[in-house]
Structures are given as structure tokens and as C-alpha cells.
Amino acid sequence: MGEARSRRVFFALWPDHEAVGQLSALGRSLAGSGGRVMRPAALHLTLVFVGSVTPTQVDQLERIAGGVRGEAFDLRVDRLGFWPQRGILWAGCSQPPALLRRLAESLAGALRAAGLVIDQHSGSALVPHITLARRVHCASLPQLETSIQWRVSEFSLVETHLHPSAATYKVLASFPLNAVDPGDG
């Protein structure tokens, strides 16, 4: 008997409730007519995109992620961006925290060491961003007047469910971040 259907997964950071409210309001204010604003429950920052895996591989991903050590950090979203080829309006970090980069690189490295093939833009090539809206037509972007911040104290393994109208996400497991070495910043 074959294994159950494949599951589409990735690792991500989820903003806290206050940051979700701010990001959602920002997306609505900037998307204009015709753009599709992301639902508040869909706002996240992808660390590593894995793709389609079997249920057995989901278990393996959880074990691998459970072994990744990282430190909690403050994430400050202070810039807007736009990818015109896909009409994606996003918010991101002008100076991504070193601890964010280390977490993404450690996670990507652990997955590769286990023989998993992951998206080429994961790890060191990460452009930390939160998609605010899709199908946007944008000639220029304003400066983000006030940064949006939250304390990142965990990362999650997330499953994507694709629907005709939009994707939905289900957190499969979360992994805490702690101070590994208090002298390391």
C-alpha cells in the first residue's frame, strides 16, 4: 500500500496579534483596487520553503527542526517592496537581524544535511518579507512611516492547502527559540 498524498510544507515565523493588525491594515491601505489583500491569518515570513513531502518526511522535518537551536530576537519590519512580475506587495527588513539569518541558514543546512532538497532561495539567499497583497499594480511605494515590530520566540512547520480563491495554512509544529549563548549577539 502506498503512502498517503503528499503535503506542501514550509518553515515560517508568525507575527504576534498586534503586528498582524498593523500589517493587515498596511496591506489594505496600499493594495488599491484590483489587488488581493492577504487575510490576516495568512501573514507570515517564510524561513525555508520545502515543498511537497510525504507524511513520513513531515515526521522527519519535525525531528530535524527540533534539533535546530537559535535565539529569540526582535524583528523590525521597516520597508516596503514590490515584485512587479508577480504583482506582489510586501513588507520587510532593511537590516535583517543576524539572528534571523542564522536561524534560516541553520535550518536550511540541517535540512540539506539530512538529504532534503529545499528551495534555492532559502537560507543565506533569504529576502525576509511578508506578502501583504497579490495582483497589485504599483508605480511607486511610499516610505514606511512607522516600523512594525514583534518578538520572535519560535518558528513553525506549516502546511499549505491550496484553494481556488487563496491558500490557507495550518501550523503542524512549533519550535521554541532560546538564548543559546548569552554572550553571542
Image: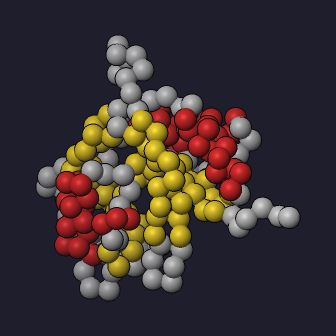
Name the image quarter holding residue 2.
Answer: bottom right
* Residue at screen point 40% across, 79% down: 135
Q: Nearer the viewer, residue 7 or 80?
A: 7
Q: Nearer the viewer, residue 47 or 81?
A: 47
Please, which residue is most extreme toward the bottom here?
34
| Viewport quadrant of the N terminus | bottom right
Please, which residue is most extreme toward the right here?
1
- Indicate the position of residue 153 as horizontal and vertical percent values: 35, 37
How is colour applied across the structure in the image? secondary structure
* Count of numbered tags: 0
Q: Is residue 181 visible?
A: yes
- Indicate the position of residue 107 as horizontal and vertical percent values: 55, 38
Q: Is residue 78 visible?
A: no
Please, which residue is most extreme toward the top here?
183
| Viewport quadrant of the C terminus | top left
> Is 159 situated left or right of 135 in this image?
right
Please, which residue is most extreme toward the front here?
1
- Indicate the position of residue 161 as horizontal and vertical percent values: 53, 70
> Is 109 situated left or right of 72 in this image?
right
* Residue at screen point 55% across, 35% down: 66
* Residue at screen point 26% across, 58% down: 20
Q: Nearer the viewer, residue 26 or 151?
A: 151
- Indicate the position of residue 40 as horizontal and vertical percent values: 30, 66
Q: Nearer the viewer, residue 53 or 24?
A: 53
* Residue at screen point 71% across, 67% down: 5
Looking at the image, residue 94 lies above or below residue 44: above
